[in-house]
Image (spheres, rainbow, N blue to C red):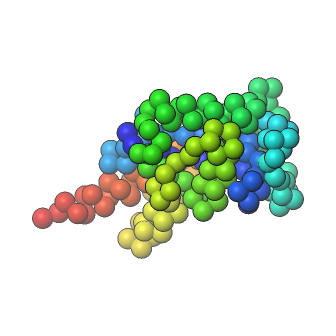
Amino acid sequence: MKHLMIDIEAMDDKPTAAITAIAAIFFNPETGEIGESFSRRISLEDSMSKGGTVSAEVILRCLRQPVGIRRLMFDDFLYDIDCAICDFYDFVNSNMPPLGVRVWYGCPSLRSAVLRTAMQKFVGDSFEYGNEQSVTTVNELAKSLGLNMESIIPNTRINNAYDQVVYNIKIVSYVWMYLMKIASVK
């Protein structure tokens, strides 16, 4: 599988944002099949101590979350940012060379920049430029085709980056297969 859906929890809207979670799953959008997965909760304190930035806007958004979601930031077992990034890089490399991966993000303009900055800092390598794919674009395409993705695939249980990755894979795969079905009509 060469498609990798990624989500991160970032504490700022800058490329230097402190990262508090990384989740990723390899998948095949033609079938919806999912492959190997990765998930790490990351210490905000460690991420900030190693240069990660935090914005007041994101802090306020976090404080408005339900208690159970806020509690995840203070879990008993959180990874240091450098270990989480190294583990993530090893995960990607063990499944496919990073330069061949089609990387999907809900919002590539922000998420890609944040993850790329962290990867460059801690492992000195990242994904190939231009390989970022956008879930947002797929959602817009679905709307223009008359598909109401919110009713087709309800957004019922998204409490963390991993849940968001699973949801995004469902969206992308559904639209991808829908388009393949349309294209194959003779």
How far across and how far down the image is residue 82, in percent?
71, 35
Which of the 4 image quarters holds residue 182?
A: bottom left
- Nearest the viewer among 67 and 99 is 99
Q: Nearer the viewer, residue 75 or 134?
A: 134
Whole-percent x, y for residue 93 in the image = 49, 33
| Quadrant housing the N terminus | top left
Residue at 67% x, 50% y is 117
Q: Is residue 17 visible?
A: yes
Give the side of residue 144 with respect to residue 183, left or right.
Answer: right
Q: Residue furthest left?
A: 186
Name the residue rendered at 60%, 54% in the picture. 112
Left or right, 161 with reference to 173: right
The relative height of residue 78 versus residue 181 in the rendered view (above or below) is above
**Rendered image quadrant of residue 144:** bottom left
Considering the image in quadrants, where does the C terminus appear?
A: bottom left
Give the percent coordinates (x, y) of residue 165. Answer: 55, 45
